[in-house]
Image (cartoon, rainbow, N blue to C red):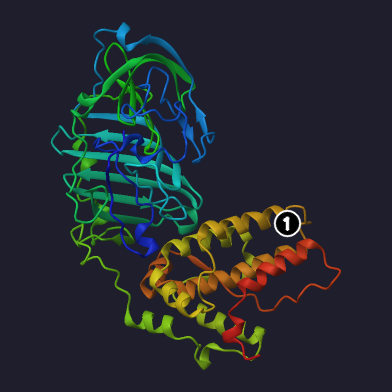
């Protein structure tokens, strides 16, 4: 079950769309196969309760653990038919309840791909386009029928830039996401304050947490023995469906164990829902991390009191000085050197005079530099790159992060056969140092750099000596690393007078 209600985009700034998780929510109108089933999924992966002829039967639309859009990019669960719907005249309806908790809870979140990291995964009401598939696990607390009227998730998400933990609270129309970033960001926390709108579109009506009675619209499909992902077990459960939404519940009590929607997600409640009154302290709103006083280092779209701001109030406050620096195509004299070595020394001096701690380039590993660059990419001010792209400025991002990551992985694979002391590794590291510094200086606003510095994020210094072009007899490792290095060390074209 996934809501057709989703979060609006936070802003064009990538930092402000970072990790924007979506609630498990109210069943909306199902687009069903009216979207044309664009990925040509078979009836095991997708079988909507409507618009399928013949209608879906037991062990159809069962899904599994998906990893991609192709029909075979899924590990289908096991399933065997125990009884058809006609053989079970009075099945026990699935029970959601007004107050309950689930720990552990597992899911694969599915939604349209809107960011390179699949952080902002927003389940939609159709499967058109490239989709993200992101596994999460943790706990879920439901108190919509209780005093708080709220829903809470505590989730761990595995991402390309490390594991991220999130606390998510949805109360009335307010939505709070508190994220804690990986080790290389020194555990920096972030709070996003938002509101949930139907379909995720501005101007649509605001949405509240899922109603306790939503299961009343489900239709009985049959009884099956089905595999329960992440538990290594099979259970005999009743299969229910509405549109593309499917759930499996225990025949005796209607405890929901498993839910699947092919373009929204897989959800596993291994022990069902523990339907007992919930600790109200779990639902403190606004969360302390979202308030200005004593709150998280990054607060996105949050008022001083921790409530969601309007789009106008939360517009990115890029200073005039930042804009002027981005629009200045030629660095001033104090940022130039006579040659590569002098340029690097001059620029290192400016970096060391900044707020962030620094480390010489040769004290970094390539992996550490790539992780730092991923964090910078997430926090970048997109409007700066718009300026650079419009004039072909060397400071522009040459590719999207998917392509950047793919290039990194390809070079890693190629250099894996080079000896540990091969010069290609040094060339590669030095190139990353230059590129990371360029991103830091020219793609972050002053306030974001200050926030990172206050959190203890360390910045590399530039390597002092340039690498010469490989001679004709150089091996492929040397040539490959140097080819990438040339694209990364672009600062000398403006900052060095040669």
Q: Quadrant of residue 134?
A: top left
Q: Nearer the viewer, residue 458 or 164?
A: 164
Q: Residue at x 19, y 30 (%)?
A: 212
How many discs appear? 1
* Left or right, residue 195 beside residue 484: left
Q: Secondary structure at mark 1?
A: helix
Where does residue 367 sit, x and y in percent of width and height? 60, 57
The vertical placement of 98 against 166, above or below, is above
Question: In the rendered image, which residue does mark 1 sit on?
Answer: 415
Instruction: Looking at this view, name the residue that lies furthest to the left.
Output: 147
In this view, 131 is above or below 371: above
The reply to whether residue 20 is in sight is yes
Taking depth in this image into account, of 127 and 317 the one nearest to the observer is 127
Instruction: Locate the C terminus by quadrant.
Output: bottom right
- Name the residue furthest bottom: 333
Residue occupying the far right of the picture: 473
Q: Is residue 123 left or right of residue 40?
A: left
Measuring from the top left, give residue 127's x and y in whole percent.
39, 42
Is 34 on the left or on the right of 234, as rendered?
Answer: left
Quarter of the image that includes the N terminus: top left
Q: Is residue 362 visible?
A: no
In the rendered image, the vertical position of residue 360 relative to residue 179, given as above or below:
below
User: Where residue 18 sits in the image (x, y, percent)?
Assistant: 38, 56
270 lies above or below 360: above
What residue is at 13 percent from the left and 36 percent from the top? 147
Residue occupying the point 57% across, 86% down: 495
Q: Which image quadrant for residue 403?
A: bottom right
């Amino acid at each position: 079950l996934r809501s057709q209600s989703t979060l609006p985009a936070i802003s064009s700034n990538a930092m402000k769309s970072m990790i924007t998780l979506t609630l498990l929510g109210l069943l909306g109108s199902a687009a069903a196969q009216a979207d044309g089933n664009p990925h040509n999924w078979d009836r095991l992966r997708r079988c909507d309760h409507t618009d399928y002829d013949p209608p879906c039967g037991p062990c159809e639309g069962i899904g599994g653990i998906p990893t991609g859009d192709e029909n075979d990019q899924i590990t289908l669960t096991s399933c065997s038919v125990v009884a058809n719907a006609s053989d079970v005249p009075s099945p026990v309806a699935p029970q959601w309840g007004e107050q309950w908790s689930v720990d552990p809870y597992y899911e694969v979140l599915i939604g349209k791909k809107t960011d390179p990291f699949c952080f902002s995964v927003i389940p939609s009401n159709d499967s058109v386009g490239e989709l993200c598939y992101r596994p999460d696990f943790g706990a879920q607390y439901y108190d919509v029928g209780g005093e708080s009227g709220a829903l809470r998730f505590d989730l761990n998400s595995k991402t390309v830039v490390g594991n991220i933990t999130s606390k998510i609270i949805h109360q009335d129309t307010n939505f709070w996401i508190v994220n804690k970033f990986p080790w290389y960001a020194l555990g920096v926390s972030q709070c996003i304050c938002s509101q949930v709108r139907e379909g995720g579109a501005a101007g649509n009506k605001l949405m509240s947490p899922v109603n306790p009675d939503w299961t009343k619209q489900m239709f009985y499909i049959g009884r099956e023995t089905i595999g329960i992902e992440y538990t290594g077990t099979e259970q005999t459960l009743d299969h229910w469906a509405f549109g593309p939404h499917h759930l499996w519940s225990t025949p005796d009590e209607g405890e929901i164990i498993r839910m699947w929607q092919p373009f929204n997600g897989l959800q596993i409640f291994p022990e069902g829902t523990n339907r007992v009154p919930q600790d109200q302290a779990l639902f403190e709103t606004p969360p302390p991390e979202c308030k200005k006083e004593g709150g998280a280092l990054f607060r996105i779209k949050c008022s001083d009191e921790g409530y969601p701001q309007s789009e106008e109030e939360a517009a990115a406050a890029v200073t005039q000085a930042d804009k002027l620096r981005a629009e200045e195509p030629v660095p001033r004299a104090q940022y130039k050197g006579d040659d590569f070595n002098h340029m690097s020394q001059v620029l290192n001096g400016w970096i060391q005079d900044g707020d962030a701690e620094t480390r010489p380039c040769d004290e970094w590993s390539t992996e550490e530099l790539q992780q730092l660059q991923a964090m910078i990419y997430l926090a970048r001010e997109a409007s700066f790159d718009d300026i650079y792209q419009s004039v072909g400025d060397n400071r522009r991002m040459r590719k999207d992060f998917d392509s950047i990551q793919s290039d990194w992985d390809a070079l890693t694979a190629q250099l894996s056969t080079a000896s540990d002391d091969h010069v290609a590794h040094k060339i590669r590291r030095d190139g990353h140092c230059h590129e990371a510094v360029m991103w830091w200086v020219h793609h972050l606003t002053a306030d974001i750099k200050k926030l990172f510095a206050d959190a203890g994020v360390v910045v590399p210094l530039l390597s002092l000596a340039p690498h010469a072009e490989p001679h004709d007899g150089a091996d492929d490792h040397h040539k490959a690393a140097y080819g990438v290095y040339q694209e990364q060390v672009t600062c000398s074209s403006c900052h060095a007078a040669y």
